[in-house]
Structure formats: structure tokens, C-alpha cells
Amino acid sequence: MNKLVKLSALLLAMSLSFVANAQGKIAVLNMQQAIVNTELAQTRLKQLQEEASYSENRKELEELGKSFQDTRAQLQKDAAVMSAEQQQAAAKQLQEKRADIEHVQRKLQAAEQQLLQQLMQEMQPVLQKAVDELIKAEGIGLLLNQQAAMFADSSYSITAKVTDKLNQLSK
């Protein structure tokens, strides 16, 4: 009886895997990453980074970061000999510098996000064509958004293949 149960379980498992294979592969895709990794996106990102306003913001961010670190180091060094008012003033100065850093970071992130949204909109038709071609070529029966999957082994990801296809189709 025990052998019969094991044999039945084995046959059931084999038939389920056969059904799953007959219906196609399962794959995951990170569309945003696929687009960001394209040659076009990398070129546009480099152009953005070379724009005067962006590079000025990057420089300001670096200067603010260095100033913040210097002020914090000075405060730590002199804290023992500072009065309570001086410590409060230095802490307030650090807080203001941190706020300035966060403001500049948000400006840089907003510029990058705007570029990404433009690329997503511009490349949507080509992305759809690339994904459709890969679905047919690879026999994919179920394609999931990678961010929606709780876990997906990297072998299920077709993101790099989509990026390659986008590079081919964009030429």
C-alpha cells in the first residue's frame, strides 16, 4: 500500500510538471530596470549629468556633505568644552545642513525621475514589441512584474534579454 501511495504521488507530480511545461514557462521582468539599462537611457542619463544645473547641484551636494562632516567632527571634538547654548547652536547648524542636503538630493532625484518617466513613455511601444517577441521566442506562458513577486530566482528574469532586445530595436 505504501508503495502504491508513493507511486501515485510520483505520477501526480510528474503530470503536474508536464501540465506546467505544456502551458509555457514562467518569467519575471523588471521593466524599469530593462529600460534604464538600455544604451539610450545610459546616453540620456549621461547628458543629464552633464547639464549645468544638474552638475551644479551635484557639486553643491558634495560641498554640503563635506561641510556637514566637518561641522559634525568639530562638534564631537569640542563638545566637552562647549556650553549648552553653543552645543544647541551647533546641533541646529547640523540640522540645517542636513535639511539642505536632503533638498538638493530631492532635486537631483526629481530630475532623474523625470528623465525615467520620459524614457518609459517614449520606449513603451518598443518595450511592448520586445516583450511580445521574447514571449513567443521563449515560450513564456506567464510573465510577472518582478516587483510583484515575493521571490523569483534570477534564472526566471528576462530583464537583461528585454534590455538587449530594446537595444536592437532602438537602432
Image (cartoon, rainbow, N blue to C red):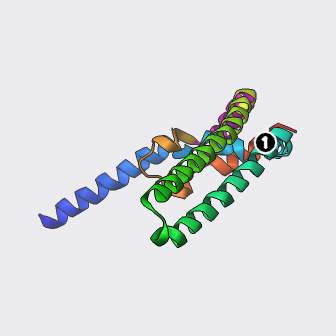
Quarter of image, res 130 = top right
For the residue pair 169 and 123, the one nearer the viewer reads as 123
For the residue pair 37 and 60, the one nearer the viewer reads as 60
Which residue of the protein is positioned furthest toward the right in this rendering?
Answer: 171
Give the vertical position of 125 relative to 23 (above or below).
above
Give the amino acid type for the residue marked by disc 1 in the picture.
Tyr
For the residue pair 140 and 57, the one nearer the viewer reads as 57
Q: Quadrant of the N terminus?
A: bottom left
Residue 133 lies within the magenta run: yes
Q: Mark 1 = which residue?
A: 54
Q: What stretch is highlighted in magenta?
A: 124-139
Residue beneath the point at 48% across and 47% down:
21
For the residue pair 122 and 72, the one nearer the viewer reads as 72
Give percent across and percent down for residue 36. Answer: 70, 44
Give percent across and percent down for residue 77. Answer: 54, 72
Residue 156: in sight, yes or no?
Answer: no
